[in-house]
């Protein structure tokens, strides 16, 4: 008998051949699909706050999770110059029981002061200090479970805060090594034009940002600072924006420094994850829930 005949399936007259089942689709976390019940005594809310950084009051948004008591808290750090704020993630995380402080930096989007990469790092440190201060206590901040989540330049600031041993964990979304990226832009006219256009949405010039990077290049060494995140869980998310090699290097530095080895996941999408927003949010929620279970 021919081998081809053995592969034939006998189908009753008029019936359709059976089709293989579709692969199972992972169930989305409830925070992506369902509003939680309203807590009339401790409702979810959105508060406008100002945190003080080097003498200036900078505006920020605080998404407060529903429920009594304290909640784990995310410090959400946006990229350069802040076109993508990732506030959709803030809402998802709020529904998942997290407080989220989404900040700006000095000199961008109406915030007072001068924009610089030095100030980005300082402002992230100041926002973290505010979360631990008595001023934040009325919002139910669990100061022992603060996770930094940074996208692009915000990922750079997140890595720069790796030495803060009070931080419970780190999430990097297409984190940018701003030293390497700025020096590359200074050397390549095509890269400089794009970088300078982004800088035009701040009150800094490209030349001032490049000078800032040159002055701090050694202190801001990417893998040296990334290694300081060791001892805490780290999630590294990459895309097709060209930043994956530096993000993989950061993950490797954490592992080599004693780990635990970061969770690394690549998504076939752009720098803002425009067609992967649900996948991005679901991945972050699942990772947070696994490492910081509800109390």
Image (cartoon, rainbow, N blue to C red):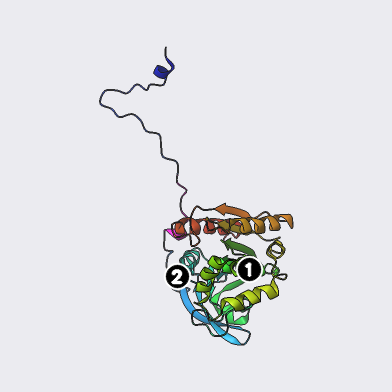
Whether residue 124 is visible here, answered yes or no, is: no
Q: Which residue lies furthest to the front in this view?
A: 189
Above or below 76: residue 116: below
Query: Which residue occupies 74% across, 58% down?
Result: 257
Q: Name the residue at the right extreme.
A: 257
Question: How many angstroms separate mark 1 from mark 2 (CA)?
Answer: 50 Å
Q: Position of residue 26 (x, y in %)?
A: 47, 48
Return the x and y of residue 207 as percentages of the image width and height. 60, 77
Left or right: residue 162 versus residue 75 is right
Which is the main secondary structure of the residues drawn in magenta?
A: loop
| Residue 71: quarter of image | bottom right
* Of marks 1 and 2, the one in the foreground: 1
Q: Residue 289 carries which label?
A: none
Question: Image height check: is 60 above or below 238?
Answer: below
Marks 1 and 2 in Cβ contact (< 8 Å): no
Residue 56 image-quadrant placement: bottom right
Label whose residue precedes the other's in the sequence (1 or 2)? 2
SS category of the residue bearing label 2: loop
Q: In the visual, does 61 lie left or right of 247?
A: left
Label 2: few (<14), some or many (≥20) within 10 Å? few
- The residue under label 1 is 183
In the rendered image, which residue does mark 2 sit on? Answer: 39
> Which is more toward the observer, 183 or 228?
183
Tell me which segment is drawn in magenta.
Answer: 25-35
Per the image, label 1 sits on a secondary structure element best described as helix
């Amino acid at each position: 008998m021919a081998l081809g005949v053995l592969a034939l399936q006998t189908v009753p007259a008029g019936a359709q051949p059976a089709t293989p089942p579709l692969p199972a689709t992972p169930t989305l976390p409830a925070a992506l699909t369902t509003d939680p019940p309203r807590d009339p005594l401790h409702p979810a809310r959105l508060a406008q706050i100002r945190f003080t950084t080097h003498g200036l009051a900078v505006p920020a948004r605080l998404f407060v999770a529903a429920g009594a008591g304290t909640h784990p808290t995310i410090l959400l750090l946006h990229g350069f110059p802040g076109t993508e704020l990732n506030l959709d993630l803030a809402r998802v995380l709020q529904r998942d029981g997290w407080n989220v402080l989404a900040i700006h930096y000095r000199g961008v989007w109406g915030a007072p002061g001068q924009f610089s990469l030095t100030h980005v790092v300082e402002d992230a440190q100041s926002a973290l200090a505010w979360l631990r201060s008595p001023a934040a206590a009325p919002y139910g901040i669990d100061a022992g479970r603060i996770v930094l989540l940074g996208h692009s330049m915000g990922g750079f600031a997140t890595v720069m805060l790796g030495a803060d041993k009070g931080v419970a964990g780190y999430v990097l979304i297409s984190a940018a090594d701003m030293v390497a990226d700025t020096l590359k832009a200074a050397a390549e006219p095509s890269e400089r034009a794009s970088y300078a256009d982004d800088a035009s949405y701040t009150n800094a010039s490209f030349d001032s940002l490049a000078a800032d990077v040159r002055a701090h290049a050694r202190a801001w060494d990417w893998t040296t600072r990334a290694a300081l995140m060791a001892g805490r869980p780290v999630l590294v998310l990459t895309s097709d924006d060209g930043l994956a090699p530096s993000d993989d290097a950061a993950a490797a530095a954490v592992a080599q420094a004693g780990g635990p080895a970061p969770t690394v996941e690549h998504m076939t999408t752009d720098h803002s994850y425009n067609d992967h927003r649900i996948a991005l949010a679901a991945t972050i929620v699942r990772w947070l829930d696994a490492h910081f279970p509800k109390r």
